[in-house]
Amino acid sequence: MKDTTLDDIIEAALLAAGEPLPVERLETLFLADECPSRKALREALSRLALRHDNGALELVETASGFQLRIRPRLAHWVSRLWDERPQRYSRALLETLALIAYRQPVTRGDIEDVRGVSVSSSIIRTLMERGWIRVVGHRDVPGRPAVYATTRSFLDDFGLKTLDALPPMHTLVNGDDPEALSLEEASSEQNPPPALDETPESVQDAPPQQDENTSAASADHHAETALTQPLSFADLEARLAARAKRQHEDASTQTNDVRSDDHE
């Protein structure tokens, strides 16, 4: 079999599949007596990536395999082919997803401590329905809160092979990566893992989230406001840092006010 023919077969399969294909799945395209070696398949994939290096398509290796995708920069125009508008996500939802991705496994309380506001049940529910996060256990503390982590679907949808492919937050904040990942277009420092229940739990077994009270819903009102521009991981980190700074300044102001009252 000529290399050009092999390249064409693989390219056609990737275009037709509509989902990432691992090398093992590509092998099933061929009869037993004509199946190329895995080395030959990977070489063909490398040539395919070079062929599309400067084109409208790109070859991406995700956690589930290889996929030919339209480059994110062209999504704005291609999306007009469909009447249905692409789904947009609120800043609150994207901040929550970023925190789970970079600091997993985390509880809802961990996320609220960093964001400084309550995380609405609708945000967690949307992320789970989208298949981007799942319950991986429960923390061994009073109340046994659910612990969340990202899924293989998250890696696939954001074009990542592993979590190690996430851009370091400090690099993005310093501006060293001119092509920062956009959470809408594709897609750290890890905390030590907390104590988890010995028996992992599936998403279906997760306990229902309790509704927030009125004040919590008001504090997180921006969760219902859709973004008009893609939000990068750098934007998320900057927003979280700014919020933490404001909280620190507010706490310092309150302390100074108390000291002033004592002197009076």
Image: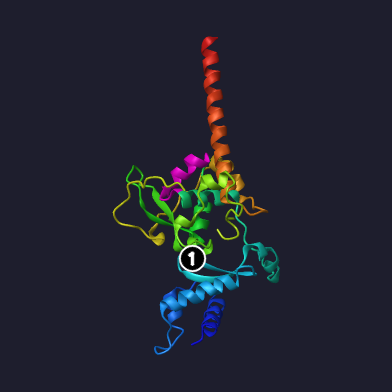
- Percent across and percent down for residue 163 are 45, 56
Identified at 60% across, 68% down, the residue is 53
| Residue at the left extreme of this rendering | 198
Q: Could you tell me residue 12's position as x and y percent?
A: 56, 81
Q: Position of residue 137 (x, y in %)?
A: 36, 53
Residue 106 belongs to magenta span: yes
Q: Which residue is drawn at 55% across and 19% down?
A: 257
**What is the residue that sits farthest to the top in this orientation?**
264
Residue 215 position (above or below residue 68): above
Corner quadrant of residue 37: bottom left
Q: Name the residue under label 1.
A: 62
Disc 1 crowd rating (10 Å Cα; few below 14, some 14-19, many 20+) is many
Instruction: Give the residues drawn in magenta, as a range.
Output: 103-116
Element at label 1: strand
Q: Magenta region, mostly helix, strand or loop? A: helix
Mark 1 residue type: Thr
Is residue 33 left or right of 212 when viewed as pictured? Answer: left
Find out whether residue 7 is within the magenta segment: no
The quadrant in which the C terminus is found is top right
Residue pictured at 64% horizontal, 50% vertical: 225
- Name the residue nearer the viewer: 6 or 243: 6
Picture coordinates of residue 87, whole percent (x, y): 62, 61
Q: Is residue 100 above or below residue 252?
A: below
Colour convention of the picture: rainbow
Against 187, is 8 above or below?
Answer: below
Q: In this view, does 201 lie to the left or right of 8?
A: left
Residue at 52%, 42% in the rendered image: 115
* Number of numbered discs overlaid on the protein picture: 1
Q: Which of 11 and 228 is in front in this view?
A: 11
